[in-house]
Amino acid sequence: MVVHRVWKGSILSGIAGVYRSEKYVVVERHRHQFPQQCIWCGRAVAADNVPVSPTADGDVKPPMCVTCTATRNRLPKSVGFFGLITFAAAPFVYSSFGALIAGALLLTGFIDLVIAWRLHVAASGFQAVRQDPQYVWIGGAHNVFLDAIPSWHGMKLGEMAAHHN
Ligand SMILES: [Zn+2]
């Protein structure tokens, strides 16, 4: 692994504990340094915008560019907006259609806001394909990002799944 990093030279400077296994990114949960690249589109991310990872709680925070962050937050925003509209409309519905319909509308709005919040949480992070106390597996990374990190020499995801059966 060390030889590999030296061979790839400056591109890999500062990258540690982050590996590629097929189309997945494998991260050493408690000791890693991501490249300064967006994990979703591969574009360079300024050093100031690379989040501290791992966090104090041991959370893994892959670097994301401003555009990808905005894109991933667009859906939760519009869903949340719909929820707020529903609440705003409730008094008018109440006066025209009565309490039952207005109540149903408020319930719909509430559920919608819960969904928006869950989407928001999902957008600000990622969906781990697999995680254990030591490693976190992330899917959906861009090829440019995958090409920038050293190869994983451990078991592949499929092999590990087979191992547990
Ligand atoms: Zn991006």
Image (cartoon, rainbow, N blue to C red):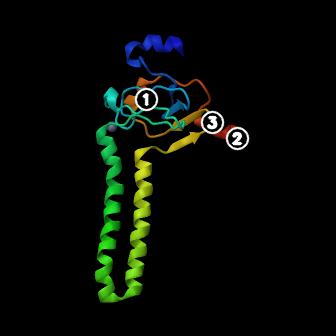
User: Which residue carries the number 2 mark?
Assistant: 164
- Secondary structure of the residue carrying numbered label 2: helix
Residue 30 image position (x, y, % from top left): 56, 30
Quadrant of image for the C terminus: top right
- Number of the front mark, 3 or 1: 3
Q: Quadrant of residue 149?
A: top left
Residue 106's place in the image compared with 42, above or below, is below
How far apart marks 3 and 1 lie (CA) works out to 23 Å
Q: What residue is shown at x 40% (from left), y 26% (from top)?
A: 35
Q: What residue is shown at x 43% (from left), y 74% (from top)?
A: 107
Contact flag, marks 3 and 1 (Cβ < 8 Å): no
Extreme-front residue of the structure:
56
Identify which amino acid the numbered label 3 is placed on.
Pro
Q: Is residue 156 left or right of residue 146?
A: right
Identify which amino acid the numbered label 2 is placed on.
His
Residue 133 image position (x, y, % from top left): 63, 36
Who comes first in sequence, dot 1 or dot 2?
Answer: 1
Q: What residue is shown at x 51% (from left), y 35% (from top)?
A: 56
- Secondary structure of the residue carrying numbered label 1: helix
Q: Is residue 60 left or right of residue 71?
A: right
Contact flag, marks 2 and 3 (Cβ < 8 Å): no
Residue 146 circle label = 1
How far apart marks 1 and 2 lie (CA) works out to 26 Å
Residue 133 circle label = 3
Is 43 in front, or is 120? 120
- Secondary structure of the residue carrying numbered label 3: loop
